[in-house]
Image: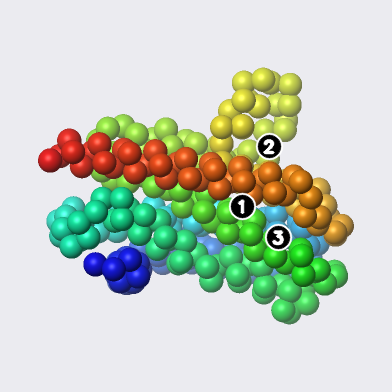
């Protein structure tokens, strides 16, 4: 089975399962709420957007990964004939599904003039990159909710991790607590730019060294999670074999 065909199959199967309805419905209700009062402060709005996209992509990723029952999944794997190929396609499928959502979050207020000023072209490019990376990190944290791991007791620790990520901005309350700060460093760096957005208000967003460090760190973090996940699924495959 070709990669594009597998992605199309994953997305079609997920849509037919109707598992997307709950997270998407919550997203649109929340989307309407946060755009209800205008004009909007640019970076405060995108601060909320980055967190929202991370949480939604995590839910969508978990839904796509666990969409098939075990019988159907076994049949699909027989067609694919490659464990890594099968699981990478799930991740890519979730990222493709997320594209309309973060583009809507980015461009809706721009097109309808909800912001107090227009964005520079470089700011738009940087924002797209950051939202994509937020989506990537959301999906790559969701992979560890694979139903095949549940019996091994691996789901709960990662579920706790994701819940902590949602409240990381509040970790600044514990600035002098070394343990809390260490834990924050181990979490997905989604809040690095979310917090910077929050601090900027309407100032110009600069593509400085910190931006490129974040991009590299976010890509490396996500790649590491994917690598660990693929190794775990291979071990699980050989155990079952």
Residue 10: in sight, yes or no?
yes
Judged from this view, the residue extending furthest toward the left is 241
Give whichever of 191, 23 is nearer the camera.
191
Label 1 residue SS: helix
Residue 76 lies, in percent from the top left, at: 20, 61
Q: CA distance from mark 2 to mark 1?
A: 13 Å
The disc, 2 or 1, on the residue closer to the chain's N-terminal end is: 1
Quadrant of the image occupied by residue 34 = bottom right
Classify mark 3: residues with Cα within 10 Å, few (<14), some (14-19) or many (20+).
some
Where is mark 2, residue-wise?
Answer: 170
Image coords of residue 12 (percent x, y): 32, 72
Which is closer to the viewer, label 1 or label 3? 3
- Residue plotted at (68% across, 21% down): 177
Q: Residue at x 30, y 71 (%)?
A: 5
In this rendering, the count of numbered labels is 3
For disc 1, the marked residue is 51
State whether residue 209 is above or below residue 43: above
Q: Quadrant of residue 20?
A: bottom left
Disc 1 crowd, CA 10 A, few/some/many (<14, 14-19, 20+)? many
Q: What residue is shown at x 23% (from left), y 38% (from top)?
A: 236
């Amino acid at each position: 089975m070709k990669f594009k065909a597998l992605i199309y199959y994953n997305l079609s199967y997920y849509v037919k399962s109707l598992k997307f309805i709950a997270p998407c419905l919550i997203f649109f209700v929340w989307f309407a709420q946060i755009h209800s009062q205008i004009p909007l402060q640019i970076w405060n709005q995108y601060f909320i957007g980055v967190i929202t996209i991370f949480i939604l992509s995590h839910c969508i990723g978990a839904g796509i990964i666990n969409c098939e029952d075990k019988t159907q999944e076994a049949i699909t794997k027989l067609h694919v004939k490659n464990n890594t190929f099968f699981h990478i396609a799930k991740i890519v499928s979730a990222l493709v599904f997320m594209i309309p959502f973060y583009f809507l979050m980015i461009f809706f207020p721009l097109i309808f003039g909800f912001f107090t000023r227009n964005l520079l072209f470089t700011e738009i490019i940087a924002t797209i990159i950051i939202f994509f990376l937020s989506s990537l990190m959301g999906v790559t944290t969701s992979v560890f909710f694979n139903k095949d791991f549940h019996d091994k007791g691996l789901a709960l620790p990662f579920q706790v991790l994701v819940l902590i990520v949602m409240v990381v901005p509040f970790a600044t309350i514990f600035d002098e607590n070394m343990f809390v700060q260490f834990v924050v460093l181990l979490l997905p760096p989604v809040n690095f730019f979310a917090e910077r957005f929050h601090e900027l208000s309407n100032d110009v967003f600069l593509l400085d060294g910190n931006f490129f460090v974040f991009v590299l760190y976010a890509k490396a973090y996500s790649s590491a999670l994917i690598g660990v996940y693929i190794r775990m699924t291979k071990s699980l495959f050989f155990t079952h074999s």
